[in-house]
Image (spheres, helix red, strand yellow):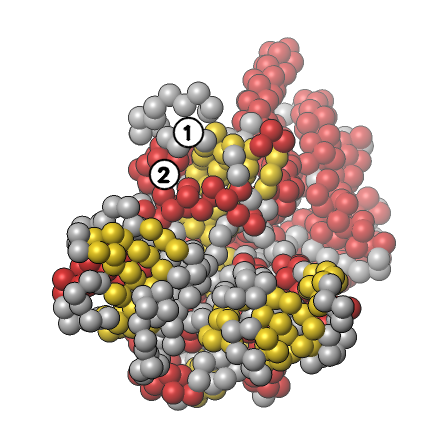
Amino acid sequence: MTSLLILIPLALILGLIGLGAFIWAVRSGQYEDMDGAAQRILHDMEDDPNG
Amino acid sequence: MTVAWPAGSVGEQSLAGHVQREAGGLCRIGLFVEGVRCGGCVARIERTLAAQPHVVHARLNLSTRRLDLAWKGARGQVDGLVGLLAGMGHAVVPWMPDDVAAADRRHEQDLLLAFGVSAFALANVMMLAWAVWIGHWGDMGPGTRAFFHWMQALIAVPAIAWAGRPFWGSAWRALRAGQTNMDVPIAAGVLLTTAMSLSETLRHGPHVYFDGALALLTVLLLGRWLDSRMRGRTRSGIAQLASIAAQPVTLRLADGRTEAVPAGRVRPGALVVVAAGERVGVDGVVREGLSEVDASLVTGESDPRPLAPGDEAIAGMLNLGQPILVEASAAGADSTLAEMVRLMEAAEQRRGRHVALADRVVRFYTPAVHGLALATFLGWLVLGAVGWQLALVHAVTVLIIACPCALGLAVPATQVAAAGRLLNEQVLIASPTALERAAAVDTVVLDKTGTLTLPGATLAETPADQALVALASGMAAASAHPLARALRAHAPEAPALASVREVRGEGLAWQGPDGEVRLGSAAFCKVDAPNAQAGPGPVVWMSAPGHAPARFRFAPVARPDAAEAVAALQAQGFRLVLASGDRAGPTAELAGALGIGEWHCGQTPADKAALIARLQAEGRRVVMVGDGLNDAPALALADASLAPGTAVDATRRAADAVWMGERLAPVPFTLALAARAHRIVRQNIGFSFVYNAVWVPVAMAGLVTPWIAAAAMAASSLAVTLNAMRVGRFSMPELRA
């Protein structure tokens, strides 16, 4: 039983880290173009100083 | 007819008006780009634009085909950048203004975050819930079960409170207004389930439904997020039309002075000066001056037409030539243009009354479900003779089982799948209810010029001497004028000539070895042409040393697949009506060529709107397809509307959907897809009724435990979503060119 008291909070903390990453990804606009991002990696872009 | 030669203004609009100005001389515009198929196009377009020294930002979204473009400099530079895209074969349509887009994007992000939090909580609660379910058959002690229930409550309660905000607010507002919407049963179901589970946790009861509440919330948030992605620009076209109508006009006073006044204040009999390049602000009669006007706003025909003293001038005509003096015959507030604004306002209010199918279903669905839940509660209390807590548990399971998942998820899922399919056919949906309204249509009213025909003109008659044609094409390569482009398109292989001079409003001149070659209006080419008016369409003259004056005649041509698309529409069983502002001859000719039996010519904007109203009065559901500002009131009035991407801005905004490209095929395709999508939505709603008919009695009998609720909900959501996805594979083989 004591193992549950450690493992469940541990699972929750790991999940929260994932949730935090998801929130960061949404906030930084990574879900706005889901088709484009997958394809962009295939093309060599010249270095664009303006992003 | 001679042709005016204003630099790129006939049928060619500058996009400068759509550019947003920001601090530091930064200009920004959002554009929908046609013909983007893959990451390769994205990379090519971005690279080309970024290579321009003044461009600071160019990013193309492959999911929405939206290009965000920012540069330092003048607004007008947008036309050059768009020209670059056109050179690569990508036409563009201005997208929504940025402030609207930003608000939409924030809302979309909020929903996605709420969905993420809810899904996270669901996954963790499920993990704990499974342990309890399995424990019911095993040897889990009541202490361990209570611990697991408390852990679930700890995760679920804050997650539900936070992630459900989109529903709480909306449901509360509806209830306060004495109405119900879809959010009322959702909020009631989720909140009651949570409260009941919390009380079971406190009482150390055997069943909690935190996972059911979270699953509902997660699925519905997903539906809401999909729905928000559907909502493009729904701003009306009225503002823009009204701004044209509100432009000040210049009055000539009795003492010869001039004064700028709002068009609405002009009295009949007043003299109004219309400078070159200005729009006529009032209806009236020309008193002085010879000029040419672009009457496309009024008639939809973009060929310049001459205007002489005694001719009627109509508000909205664009003066292309010399200044003219117009005597107002009606007050400014009664002008044709002001009338159009009023027509559109009335029409858009009418359309605002359309209630989406899902909302209509919810109107009787909600009271029915709440009634059944109440009956369950009372039934168990009175007949079952159990405690009120258990009676409430059974009533709440009815709410969980009957929650409108099919409506909340399947409708937006179908719409998103349909919109995605349409995007691949270069059709952009502007209004979330557009597909639903288009599905009910049985009559198609088509505009002629720019809709059935290609926008602009095509070279119809050339001089016999091919050397002259090649020379003209070489000169035309230097100009962006629509007629020059049409001429160039006729003989694209001719070498382009250097140092061609463009004279605004006149034509092109080039210093050849034997002397100056001119291409343009009859006056510019010094042609005395009494026989110039011998047929329809604009004419361009050419004078070259040692040659007789040569004539190029342009004519509008039907879209390449117009006949095929019209046949497809007829095969779909639509009644077709052609409504054109043009004269009887060309209208009848095109109607005959395409096999459209019913046609009306010489239609003013008000006539077109009246035609739509008449058809609707006959009980017809009408879709209007048009591109001119003169079509805008009819587009707004019709049950659904389509406009080509080349249409003027106010018209595109009045339309429900915009299609790109030269083909007419997207029109039958959109209508067929709308019908298909509607059928699937109805199937899904029907499915959810069957599902409820099976499970609600089970829940009322008190036989639904949390794991049955979870399984039934997952199965129904999956079924309607998979059904919705079928619309994404829709195709019409008869239209494949």
- Between label 1 and label 2, give the one nearer the viewer: 1
- Quick check: marks 1 and 2 in contact, CB under 8 Å? no
Q: Where residue A22 sits: x, y (%)?
A: 55, 27
Q: Earlier in the sequence, mark 1 or mark 2?
A: 2
Query: Mark 2: few, some, or many residues within 10 Å (few <14, many ≥20)?
Result: many
Residue at position x 38%, y 46% from top? B83
Asked if both marks, 1 and 2, belong to the same chain, the answer given is: yes
Residue under pointer 1: B53
Residue at position x 40%, y 58% from top? B660
Q: Chain of mark 2?
A: B
Which numbered disc covers residue B275? none
Question: B98 or B568, which lies in front?
Answer: B98
When the figure is inspected, residue B150 is found, relative to residue B46, above or below; the finding is above
Q: Where residue B163 sits: x, y (%)?
A: 68, 36
When the figure is inspected, residue B597 is found, relative to residue B353, above or below; the finding is below
The C terminus of chain B lies in quadrant: bottom left
Residue at position x 73%, y 63% from top? B257
Residue under pointer 2: B45
Residue A5 is left or right of residue B157, and the answer is left
Location of residue B19 (image quadrant): top right
Answer whether residue B195 is visible to the viewer in this image.
yes
Query: Mark 1: few, some, or many residues within 10 Å (few <14, many ≥20)?
Result: few
Answer whether residue B104 is visible to the viewer in this image.
no
